[in-house]
Amino acid sequence: MTDTLIREVNHIQLSCSMKSVVDAWQIAIKDLKSNIKSYQTKDMPNPKPCIMAGNDYSSPWTRDAAINSIFSCSLLLPQIAKNTLLSVLTKHNDNTIISGEYWDKIIWIWGAWDHWLHTRDNNFLRKAYEAGVNTIRQLEEQEMDTTDDLFFGPGWDGCSGYPDPYATATGGIYDWKNFNPDKCRNLGEGFPIKTFSTNCIYAQAYSCLHQIKHTIRINDHHHWQVKENRLIKAINKHFWCEDKGYYRYLCDPIGYTEESEALGQSYAIIFKIADDRQRNLVFKNQPISNAGIPSIYPDYKRYQAYPKPLKYLEKFNHPNQLIDIDEPDARAVGRHCAVWPFIQGFWALAACLHKQHDLFDFEFNNLLNHAIRDQQFAEIYHPDTTEMYGGLQEISEQDGIVLTKSCTHQTWSATAYMNMVLHCILGIRASDTGMRFHPHLPKGIDEMSLINLKWHNWTIDLTIRRATPLEPSITITGNDEAADLGMIPISGTGHVKVAITL
């Protein structure tokens, strides 16, 4: 069964006038396929092929399941994407809820809605609505601050992603509560922290729940759009930093800070939280490093004076097995302040949606070149040297700060590249009415084709070419309705050829 499902991807053929683009695509496909494994839970007792987070993981992760589905898997591997999304659901008091790290597990709702756009699986969507409603109601009760309409919650599980007040000797953000019980809230998980990207995800979850509710025609008392608008207003009030020209990372009394969090900036643009002026300022002012967009900028000073000789942690599940290493030549960077390809994927999408083509091309070429060089898609890269680099983080009271591993063959890094190809260069956009195309050819690429793409009852051959001085055009052959609409409608069937000149 797994081989049959994976074979669907093998039938899709990508060609490009720049050979390295296809070479990197094949590396991404290889990394993705290597991380599809049989998996089962007590709520999914029959083993099914699911997508692991990477070569160093033995189970799906909720945020990874959603992000991989959005980036490429719901389009290319819909059944395996569905299995993976369902694998992270669980039961609580006989109610289906979303499992995972609580602060951003609500991203699953976006993944579920995007999955439906590619599959029209209404039974899945009804289950998604049930799980989404149960989960967000619980989070509203426990994690919403009614004084400012924002949600409490971290954004990273490691303390290297936080300023000094949230640093812990043991490295985990969950451990912060043990070191600071007097600063904890008495409700929910207790964290007083309010993170930009986390609140953006809640706003998108509200938006998706609104769309799901109307799609499956449920008449309930929930006013998701009202909640979305209220939260967007609160985000812009409390996180926007006018003098910086971008959104601040944290806005709670303990960690109030004006660092730029790249994931949040990307979300704010993609989810239309930022207005036109704010969006243009973010594009102008967001810091970019040699390797791509850094996760958090600037980095935290506590990592610049790392202990010498430095120790290296190769396996997170064996924190006592440390290796002495030579002093690195490159500057020390916190683990969660380096370059993460999945964030590059969202930033690239935000840039492409608004024709910031130079920003897109920079991220795309960086990720492509890293994959070709390393023959894999790594978890993290050093912002200056561009090499695979896990970054520094506290690990224990005894050992202090160590250099951590950049995990190998990371799925969402591979699918981030696939997202850049599928949704940015080829410009594939699925909606509730059909598939449209808004392509962009980076400098150095004159033509790209994707052949034998299966979508609903269609087989699609898509070709994008640079054809100046011809006027931009789109031609669809093989179906009269699609030709007239200039898009692939939901209804209908057949083999169509889409040719777009730019």
Image: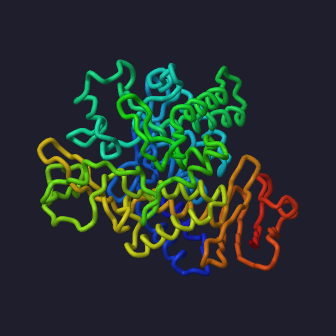
Residue at the spot 46% in from the left edge and 56% down from the top edge: 412
**Horizontal and vertical percent position of residue 372:** 43, 75
**Horizontal and vertical percent position of residue 28:** 47, 67
Nearer-the-camera pick, 456 or 150: 150
Q: Quadrant of residue 499?
A: bottom right
Quadrant (top left/top right/bottom left/bottom right) for the C terminus: bottom right
Q: Is residue 62 left or right of residue 274?
A: left
**Horizontal and vertical percent position of residue 245:** 54, 46
Residue 8 seen in the figure: no
Q: Is residue 172 above or below residue 366?
A: above
Q: Is residue 148 above or below residue 276?
A: above
Q: Is residue 377 above or below residue 180?
A: below
**Horizontal and vertical percent position of residue 33:** 45, 63
Q: Quadrant of residue 226?
A: top right
Nearer-the-camera pick, 77 or 227: 227
Residue at the spot 50% in from the left edge and 60% down from the top edge: 415
Residue at the spot 32% in from the left edge and 56% down from the top edge: 56
Q: Is residue 393 left or right of residue 271?
A: left
Q: Quadrant of residue 71?
A: bottom right
